[in-house]
Amino acid sequence: MRQRRIIYIAVGLALFLIPRLSLFPSIAKAQGIRIGVLLPLNGKLAIVGDLERKAFEMAAKEVNVSGGIQGQEIELYFRDSMGDPYVAKEAVTKLLSEDGVVLVTGGCSSSATLEATLVSEESGIPFLICTASADRLTEMNMEHVFRLNLPVSEYGKSLLLFLSKIRGLRNAAILRENSRYGQYESKTLVRICRRRGLLLSDIIEFSPNSIGHMAYLDRLSRAHPDVLFVVAKGSQSKEILGFLSSLETKPHLIICKGDPFLDMETDIRAQAMEQDYYTTALWHPAAPYPGAAEFSVRFYETYGIRPDYHSAQAYAALQVIKDTLVRSLDYEPESIRESLEQTDMMTIYGPAKFLSYGHKKRQNRPPVLILRWSKGELNPVNY
């Protein structure tokens, strides 16, 4: 009788527990893997934050639709930094203490990102920076901070390498708009000229709203530069290359910096020059990286706007996170940090491998793209 009673109890417990045990896989799946995303969703950088949020959401959706990470979905928890250090510190604290994320990514404003990474480092939670570019972010020997994008001090290295492979260049001139952007970019170009051994013949300014092309064309004719750098972001930048066609002796090389020079309309205006010209970009759909062009198409189809390099950085960050989680022993922060250390992959933004060199730790070094307009097509240049 006693044995029969034990059997009845065991069967009863089994019947009670089986339907409840079957709930656990769905519960685990519902919880997912929590990833914190710190972005400026309001404030001066809100446009950038919105672009990156869209890219993160698109990437996460694609991962989850394809089966997630070993059956678990990625769950994104967004917090607004407003591009402000104090707000960013509070936001990342909430990501860690209230949302329970195992990794944080994002970061646009360098000052805000610095405060956020200090909190993340103290808490032992990995932080993958995808946009903030101040050098010091990876020079503070923080064990849990990784950066996907290039530090600002290295932006000019690709252009210097490109110029170093072209023989016969002796002097250069800079034609820049009189703006904060024009002055900032000119400083980098001056350093490049010095390191390349180019004599800087002239720096010519023009108003972003009124080119006054006759005056600067006379100065350019006198300077007769082998290399002409054009720096502009204003509405008049599309007219500049057309005016340069009237120069009797054209520069051997024209290199343009500014978003308008990635625009087909600008190239149409420039075709009167009958000369190829070059531009630089942190990212472009024409980049020679797997999936870059396809990402641009999907982003436009999903949101009705063209992705820029911020969008590509965010999408690539999620690619790295997926790869990291797949290789991680578990989803504990320390295992994720160790897996990030071993990252060696290609993303739509270029190679991802976190290196330590000089004063920098866990820093990725994707190249700046050199692009050439030729016969209405913009293509990357091998250098």
Image (tube, rainbow, N blue to C red):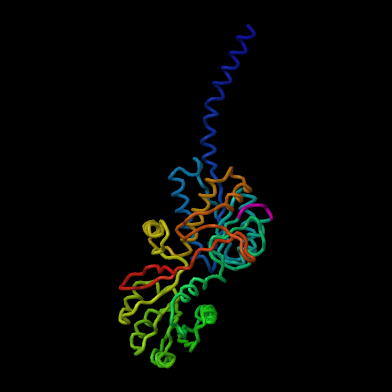
Quadrant of the drawing holding the N terminus: top right
Q: In the image as oriented, which residue stretches furthest toward the top?
A: 1
Residue 72 image point, x, y percent: 51, 42
Relative to 8, residue 117 above or below? below
Q: Which residue is at 61% across, 66% downward?
A: 84
Quadrant of the drawing holding the C terminus: bottom left
Residue 372 image point, x, y percent: 38, 72
Q: Quadrant of residue 370?
A: bottom left
Principal SS element in the magenta part?
loop
Q: Which residue is at 63% across, 55% downward?
A: 144
Q: Is residue 137 something one can see in this rendering?
A: no
Q: Nearer the viewer, residue 285 or 255?
A: 255
Q: In the image as oriented, which residue stretches furthest toward the front?
A: 167
Relative to 122, residue 308 above or below? below
Q: Which residue is at 53% across, 43% downward?
A: 32
Residue 358 image point, x, y percent: 63, 66
Q: Is residue 354 left or right of residue 350?
A: right
Q: Is residue 292 something one can see in this rendering?
A: yes
Count of residue discs: 0
> Magenta part of the protein: which range?
122-126
Residue 41 magenta:
no
Relative to 212, residue 313 above or below? above
